[in-house]
Amino acid sequence: MLFGGIDIGSRSIELVVIDENGEQVQSLKADTGFDPMSEADKMIESTRFDQIMATGYGRNLFEVSFDAPTVTEIKAHATAAFHLHNDSYTILDIGGQDSKAIALYETGKIKKFEMNDRCAAGTGKFLEIMAKNLGFSIEDFGDQALLAEKEINISSMCTVFAESEVTSLIGRGESPREIAKGLHDSVVRRAAGMINRVSSGGKIVFTGGVAKNSCMVKMLEKRLEREIVIPENPQFMGALGAALLCRAANTEKS
C-alpha cells in the first residue's frame, strides 16, 4: 500500500507519498492560491496512493472536501522529525503563518509545545514582507543579512510597526543588509524564547520553509549554543509526518 500526507499551509501545499516501509516515493509542492481545495485536487489527481491524511491550517476543509482524516501540525512535524532524526528531541517549525517549538520524550511522544499564531511576527510571512520592503528576494534575504557589518536593533515585533521602523531606518541612511540582520535577530529572539521554554538542551530539528534561511540557522545556533539540524526538505516535513501517521493508523487497523 501507498500512504499520502498533505500539508495545506497558508503559503504553499505539500504532498508526500510513502510506501509500507516509510520510504518516500513521491513529493509535490504548489502555491496555496485563493482556492486551496482546487490546488489540492490537482495534486491528488497527479499522484497515486491508497490512503491519505491531511495537516496544516486547511486540514479541516480538506477533511470535508475529501472525506479524509486529519492531524495537527504539531503532531505531524514531531512525527517526521523523530522519524528522520530519532536522537533529537526538540523541533522548531517556522512556517508562513505561525511558529512552533516542540519538545519530545525519548520515545518520540510529545512532551511540551509552545505556539505563536497571534500575528505574523516571527513567521515566514514576516520575513517575506520585510525582504520585499528592503528590495531583497526571500531566497536571498538570509544570505544578504549575513553580509551586514553591524547589527541594528529592531524593537517592534508587530509586522505593521516593524514596517514603519524599517522605513525610518532607511530614511536615516542605514544599510538594507544591516536592517535585514536586525530583522532576523528579532525573529531569532522570539524563536529562541519559545525553544528555551520547552527544552533546555540537545540538538534541534528545524522544519518549515524558514529553515532554508542561512541567517536564521546561524543566528539561532549562536544564541542557543545548540546544534541545529536541517532535514533535506524541511518544507515537506508536515506532509511527511501526515503520511507516516496515515501509515501507522492503517497498520493498526490491519
Image (cartoon, rainbow, N blue to C red):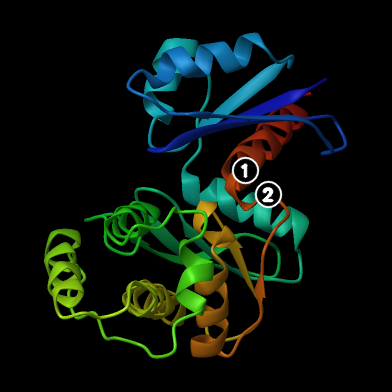
Q: Residue at x 50, y 81 (%)?
A: 219
Q: Identify residue for label 1.
A: 236
Residue 170: where, in percent of width, then height?
20, 72
Disc 2 and disc 1 in contact, CB within 8 angstroms: yes
Residue 59: where, in percent of width, then height?
43, 29
Q: Residue at x 44, y 51 (%)?
A: 95
Give the quadrant of the N terminus.
top right
Q: Is residue 8 shown to the viewer in this render?
A: no
Q: Residue furthest front?
A: 173
Lateral position of residue 45 relative to residue 34, left or right: right
Q: Identify residue for label 2.
A: 233
Amino acid type of the residue that numbered disc 1 sits on in the rendered structure: Phe
Give the quadrant of the C terminus.
top right
Q: Residue at x 73, y 25 (%)?
A: 3
Q: Residue furthest right?
A: 21
Q: Secondary structure at mark 1?
A: helix
**Of 92 and 52, the residue lying toward us:** 92
Crowding at mark 2 (Cα within 10 Å: few <14, some 14-19, many 20+)? few
Q: Secondary structure at mark 2?
A: loop
Lateral position of residue 185 relative to residue 226, left or right: left
Res 35 → quadrant: top left
Res 172 → quadrant: bottom left
Answer above or below: position of 251 versus 225: above
